[in-house]
Image (cartoon, helix red, strand yellow):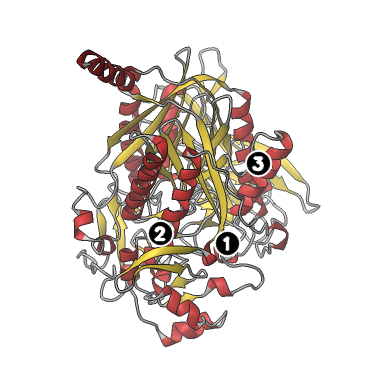
Amino acid sequence: MEFFFHLIVFAFVFHVCFAVPSVYQVGVGIADVTGPAADINMMGYAQPAQKSAGIHTRQYSRTFIIDDETRRVAFVSVDCALMDQVVKTEVVRRLESKFPGVYSHKNVVLSGTHTHSGPGGYLQYVLFLVTSKGWVQQSFDALVDGIVKSIDIADGNMQSANIYYSKDILVDANINRSPASYLNNPAPERAKYTYNTDKDMVQLKFVSTTGQPIGIINWYAVHCTSMNNTNPFISSDNKGYAGLLFEGVVNGADIMPGKGPFVAAFASSNLGDVSPNTMGAKCIDTGLPCDFVSSTCNGRTQKCIAFGPGKDMVDSTRIIGEKQFQKAWGMYEKDNSELEALEGPVQYAHQFVDMPNYWVEIEDPVNGPTMTKLCKPAMGYSFAAGTTDGPGAFDFTQGTSSENNFWNLVGSALVKPSEEIKQCHSPKPVLLSTGEITWPYDWHPSIVETQVLRIGQLLIAAVPGEFTTMAGRRFREALNSEASNNGGGSNIKTVIAGLSNVYTHYVTTFEEYQVQRYEGASTIYGPHTLSAHLDQYKTLTRSIFKNETLTAGPTPPFLLDKQISLVPGVVFDKPAFNRKFGDCLVQPYPFVRPNETVTATFVAGHPRNNLMLDNTFMNVEAKQTDGSWKVIRTDAHFDTFFFWERTSGVGQSEAHLRWIVPGDNPEGEYRISHFGHYKNIDGSTVPYNGTTQSFTVGA
């Protein structure tokens, strides 16, 4: 008997340590989703003055399809602020038309990276469209077209592959921007963790069965707010840059961004209270620390601003992006035998949920276990205060738990919050009772999409918003436990895919909600929102491991035909007297050295005449030995900047192009080209281009 016991133990250990990985069918794809690069409000900071005026790095949709020959899932990470129901629904409609019976709401996840430097106007609910002056069709089309294209590409290159899981720690790329809220969580719970943010980095490595690299998905909790609310350039921020670095190394320097076969997604996770501005917040007038609870300086929110580790926001983006890339690359370079192979089936669970009518059991300190219902959506005062990454306006401050008669009057001009709403959201003072406003249509979602994917021993929980650090920790722990209790085994692990499918703002713990900083004020379904998510996602997890079929739930509204746009269109373009489109007005200096900046200015048309998707507004070209010119940079590279400027009210504009010459750039002859389209008075658009004189890069 002892011999058989040891044999069983040996077999178990051998299986765990040296198991043959499952073979999946895997496809990856990448496509451009860059929106209009001029005159469109950026989505994220809710800063009306922040409008696009060029491109630093392009936005991409990165798709990963995994199939076990029984079921298929698609995970899509998109360089955008957040995902919206109208985008998900339209994407699914097109996929169902092109691939009948293959893709649906149930097995496709769309997850936004949360860059705050992408054009807005693509979300169907009113609150998200206020600063963008309503609907922007070009933003919507660019996202939907690019997402569908990336899925189409991935579907077309499926191949046999293994998937490897790894986890490591990256300490110095994030901080908690609401430590006062975090400290309100129970001390014994906080004592279980070394840090007040998640430092874990989780990564999936996709390798073909012939040994060829296919791609990676990386999850790390940090906001894409390295580029601040004064930035006019479209940017994929720190996560997008990390992806560009990774893809550049594997695909090679000659492959332009968005064009290579290897795809690297740096996706969002539970980043709700997590900032990349690692120098922390300080008072910009005195240099002193901000008030700990309210994040104010002498009572003013606008003076308390957090700073990244770099000399400016671009440098901070570079540093935080490089840190994520370097850690991810170290994980990737490990031999596959050192990584944990994913083994087991591909499964998924999905359900639409009516959040304001969701009942969940909570532990009442007086009455014990009690059933309670969530609230209709509402925003608190501290929502208007913004965060240290991007402060709000007026006199709002974080941590506000009392009302102000003046702002009550302003908020009531839309609708006066009912007593039911006030009591349900307490201690949140309600500024905007969005769930009670239906003019001109819904201001916030009530029907919410919930979803879990399973790939072997990994659960990908697609959540509809921004979970804080502790909310995410409770969430992962609950799902791992639920899986284990229902036959999933002890090796199940959960990763949170944030800002997926539909956006419902923030999800804090009950304790953090009481402090009513920005995150708590933006938890729109009330203090028990996290409890409801825990309950719902445990149901999804249980259904996977018990092979239970869930009802679809209520259908969310599709409000595309209700959208209103107040954004003026491009009327016409006109060059200055005696000039034509594409003329170079300012030539580069004839001789430059590495680390210097080359600049050129062209007569330009409006960038909204043609978004140049899968194309570029600028090239940097190097002269070859045979006299030909080779493109070495586009507007998607981190060291190039395309800036558009209107120079008169009669259709005249200029394009200012910059290239920061890399320190290791080869000596030689170079030139810069600009591409665009101008619009005639009759509405027709015409392509144009222009090229500078050549210049020399020397030592």
377 relative to 312, above or below: below
Whether pointer 1 and pointer 3 mark residues with C-beta atoms closer than 8 Å, the reply is no
Label whose residue precedes the other's in the sequence (3 or 2) = 3
Residue 143: mark in rendering: none
Whether pointer 2 and pointer 1 mark residues with C-beta atoms closer than 8 Å, the reply is no
Q: Quadrant of the N terminus?
A: top left
Residue beneath label 2, please?
530
Label whose residue precedes the other's in the sequence (1 or 3) = 1
Residue beneath label 1, please?
132
The amino acid type, in three-letter code, at marker 2 is Leu
| Figure quadrant of residue 394 | bottom left
Horizontal and vertical percent for residue 315?
Answer: 34, 44
Q: Residue at x 34, y 73 (%)?
A: 397
The amino acid type, in three-letter code, at marker 1 is Ser
Q: Residue at x 52, y 70 (%)?
A: 376
Q: Is residue 494 visible?
A: yes
Q: CA distance from mark 2 to mark 1?
A: 30 Å
